[in-house]
Amino acid sequence: MTEETGGAGVESNLSNSGQDYETAAPCNIVIFGATGDLTKRKLMPALMRMLHCGLIHRDSRILGVLRNRSEAEWHEMIRAGLHEYSPQLDMDEEKWREFLPHLKMVDGGLDDDTMYQRLADALETLGDKKNAMFYCAIPPEWYNRVAQGLFKAGLVSEEDGYRRLVIEKPFGSNLATASALNKELQAVFKENQIYRIDHYLGKESVQNLLVYRFANSIMEPLWNRNYIDHIQISVSETIGIEYRAKYYENSGALRDMIQSHLMQVMTLVAMEPPVEFTADAVRDEKMKVLRALRRFDPDQIAVHTVSAQYASGMVGGERVAAYVAEEDVSPDSSTETFAAMRFYIDNWRWQGVPFILWTGKRMKAKVSEVMIRFRKPPFNLFDSHASVPAANALVFRLQPEPGVVLRVNAKKPGLTTDNEEMVMRAMYASDTSEAADAYEILMHDVLTGDGTLFSRSDEIEESWSIVEPVLEAWKDRVFIERYRAGTWDVAAMDELTKDCVGGWHKPTLHE
């Protein structure tokens, strides 16, 4: 297998064919939290690239809602953020002058009713519509207040153009809070106006899972319990909690990664082919997977889950502190920085196949992937030889170096029938800088009204109901297993995967 270049990113599509994307209609792009970290790091760089590439109509406007700042201060803050977080944009004076006319500021706080009226007055009729996207780059406790403010100011009605509300994760902290937030938002907005964003699903490599599965007939006959022993879906990180200690202490790895990102990836891996590639058809199939997930018996939670927390250790040649020594973390914290869950999907295709979802911080390598481990051959002709064939594996590397890795057995060269494992790789793109950023993809989908990569309210509540028993079981623990930073030393993972062919798959960057 040679390295093949997959579909190119947004800029390549634009320059090559001009047919692989849809330029959205002009829109008022409103950002609540216009001075926040998310806006500086992700939203503004993405919006600038989208304008440059044509993914946003040139007549669109970007309205920042903020208070106690002048327009000049806000502009300087945006420009400094672009320089710091996106130096690859090469922000020279000419590019900045082109971007500047798209920016408008609305003064006021989120709790100020008059601000929403000023916002209504600031929305422009662009073309023949007053389209508006409201992006909530704010703490979750403000979502309902913003929705109510928009409603009172008459900014929910779609009589003069569409109105779309973008909500960042976390969407609730448990089933009760997620259900309450859904009810609050749906009392104001229609479900098809609400876009619950998960940046992980915006990654091109994650979306490519659907193409790998449904555009390649070679995989479908093998994609079931008859040939697959188990599946491991993982996100391994070398970083710690960075600046997110206050959030992470109340979240932990289970809420932060598994309940949202990894369960969504699992639905893409396990779902049946949708009848058509539309938002509701895809989400209907994902919901079937979630409904088929076996619920956790309270007596079996300790057997089917793992939680651990990083201790001090060496990462990248540097000593790093333990989680409990991080700033703003309680010294007796039992918050998990590593979490794993063993799921079963009780349906015809997947009955009896374990799905192992795991994530950890301060691990040995930064790798995200889906590993499909196939069953061993039913009869081993080479049992008497020194090298027994390993079980085949198909690995979808999500990051870094996204692509596909196939591990098969081959004869060693020479006068022998001994086996050795052969690794065949196919990269998704020869230059990953071509790939569009997740926020570019997701905001473009909002602007064009495509909800495929966004979670519906029933998906959110179903996923919370599945992990709720585990959250309850972990809530009052006083002890948690420790692992050395920069290692794979989570002993409980070997027990969790002991009956899986090949055991715990520890990903490596250059396998």
Image: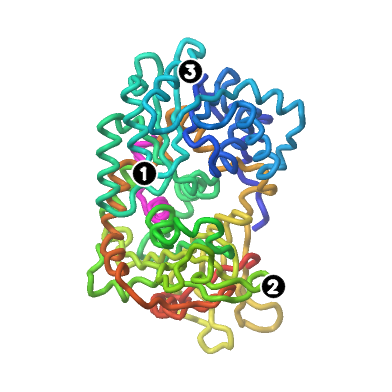
Q: Are marks 2 and 3 in contact (CB under 8 Å)?
A: no
Q: Which residue is mark 1?
A: 141
The structure residue drawn at horizontal position 39% and vertical position 36%, both measured from the top left corner, is 195
Where is residue 507, by image quadrant? bottom right
Three-letter amino acid code of the residue under disc 3: Ala
Q: Which residue is mark 2?
A: 317
Q: Which residue is mark 3?
A: 122
Whether 264 is among the magenta residues is yes
Q: Is residue 192 left or right of 406 when viewed as pictured?
A: left
The structure residue drawn at horizontal position 45% and vertical position 14%, both measured from the top left corner, is 129
- In the depicted view, which residue is nearer to us: 311 or 364? 311
Three-letter amino acid code of the residue under disc 2: Gly
N-term mark: 2 or 3: 3
Whether 228 is among the magenta residues is no
Q: Main secondary structure of the magenta part?
A: helix
Query: CA–CA distance between discs 2 and 1?
Result: 40 Å
